Image: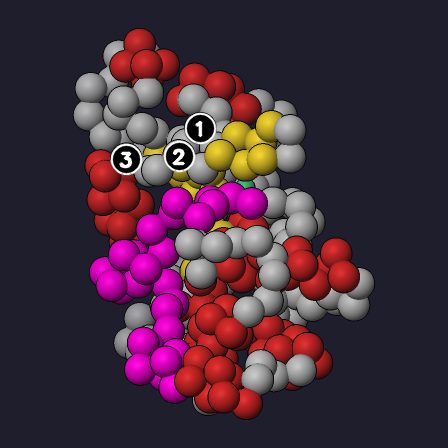
Amino acid sequence: MKPILYNKSRAIRSYNSRIRFLVFHYTAGNFSSSLSALTGPNVSAHYLIPDVTDPSYVKAGYTEQEVFNLVDEQHRAWHAGVSAWGDRTSLNDTSIGVEIVNLASYKDGVFTFPPYHPAQIIAIEELALNILGRYPDISPTQVLGHSDISIGRKSDPGPAFPWHALYLKGVGAWFDDATRQAFQDRYAQTGMPERAELLKLFKTYGYDVSKASTAQGYNQLVRAFQLHFRPANYSGVMDVETAANLAALVSKYFP
Ligand SMILES: [Zn+2]
């Protein structure tokens, strides 16, 4: 039998990777419980980034910051659940999921978001740059948090996640300050855009606005945006600063 011949004389260009998104999560549990959950029958992620100060991590015998590759990137991990961004839904099909050990919690209606460990942040940055280098179809606006794609259902990776610092290293999107300030000055003088106009901006950027017609749905949409792009105050109440951040992002990435 003759061997199968592959034409290696020219690069084939009419294909692309299945992967379009990089999605960050927190585990809301320690290393031990996170690893149990992520290797159980219900949820999984491609990567797990532990916290070196987590007693259960130390007890498991680790002394340094590691990154665990739990699911092969070629496989579909179950990390996003019901999700939407732009014209896509069910983002498990098209994303790489990164879980980060963090003891964020929710009790009596109040979220607590502890900071990420500096060693974790370095690991997140290195992993993300490695992934982005291999998947050019993941554009900056497609580096997302679970809260961005599962609005009202998820809050991870939370307001303590270093989105801006990661942007400065080349991971994900952020607005330019001068543009942001120009929008804020304009809104301070003339008032904020109408809700319909703001919803257009959210939709253009990628957010799912399909549930934003109710007061609760709109609040959850605004909160999702704030968790990522205005973490100092994620009340879900639209204000001039939030609107300016949104407008600056859209004008930068979707001019
Ligand atoms: Zn998540």
| Picture residue at 25% right of the left edge, 63% below the top | 168
Residue corresponding to mark 2: 114
Residue corresponding to mark 3: 117
Q: Magenta segment, which residues?
A: 155-182
**Amino acid on which disc 3 is placed:** His
Q: Quadrant of ligand 1?
A: top right
Between marks 1 and 2 in the image, the one whose residue lies nearer the viewer: 2
Which one is earlier in the sequence, the residue at label 1 or at label 2? Answer: 1
Q: Secondary structure at mark 1?
A: loop
| Picture residue at 23% right of the left edge, 30% below the top | 65
Mark 3 touching mark 1, by CB under 8 A? no
Residue 60 location in percent, x, y?
32, 12
Residue 179 location in percent, x, y?
36, 83
Tell me where residue 194 sits by quadrant: bottom right
Left or right of 76: which side holds 194?
right
Q: Which residue, as the protein is rendered here, is positioned at the far top?
A: 59
Mark 1 touching mark 2, by CB under 8 A? yes
Residue corresponding to mark 1: 103
Q: Quick one: label 2, few (<14), some, or many (20+) residues within 10 Å?
A: some
| Picture residue at 43% right of the left edge, 22% below the top | 30
**Amino acid on which disc 1 is placed:** Leu
